[in-house]
Amino acid sequence: MNPRVVTPLVSAGAAWATKKSMNSIYAKRHEGTVPSRDDTQVPFRQVLLWTLTTAIVVALVDVAIQQAIARWSQSEQQELTA
């Protein structure tokens, strides 16, 4: 399995799942609505804070996945050369 092919696919899937789960959690805590960029009734600060929070969490998940796959790939290559 080539890590250069697997990593972006796993990262994209994890980003999608992370955003979905965060939106679901937010909706449960805040009357079933997630702040939207299009909704002018939601304060700008709230939309910006939610967008930044989501972006940071997705980035952290992405880095964790990339690091994990890189370590896995290195250990697999070391086993093949040993």
Image: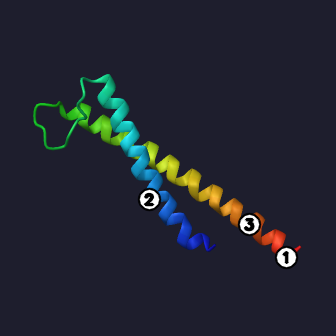
Q: Quarter of the image holding residue 4?
A: bottom right
What residue does disc 1 label? 81
**Alpha-carbon neighbours of circle 3 within 10 Å: few (<14), some, or many (≥20)?**
few
Give the vertical position of 58 relative to 26 (above or below).
below
- Callouts 1 and 2 close, C-beta under 8 Å: no
Residue located 45% across and 42% down the image: 57
Specify which label sits upstream in the sequence, 3 or 2: 2
The residue at the far right in this view is 82
- Amino acid type, callout 2: Ala
Q: Which mark is residue 12?
A: 2
**Alpha-carbon neighbours of circle 1 within 10 Å: few (<14), some, or many (≥20)?**
few
Residue 43 place in picture, x, y as percent: 17, 30
Closer to the camera in the image, 39 or 27: 27
Specify which label sits upstream in the sequence, 1 or 3: 3
Between circles 3 and 2, the one closer to the viewer is: 2
By what rule are the colours in the image chosen? Answer: rainbow
- Amino acid type, callout 1: Thr
Q: Quarter of the image holding residue 2?
A: bottom right
What residue does disc 3 label? 74
Residue 37 place in picture, x, y as percent: 19, 43
- Amino acid type, callout 3: Gln
- For label 1, the SS is helix
Give the vertical position of 63 relative to 70 (above or below).
above
Q: CA distance from mark 3 to mark 2?
A: 22 Å
The answer to whether residue 64 is left or right of residue 28 is: right
- For label 2, the SS is helix
Residue located 31% across and 41% down the image: 51
Residue 46 place in picture, x, y as percent: 25, 31
Residue located 27% across and 38% down the image: 48
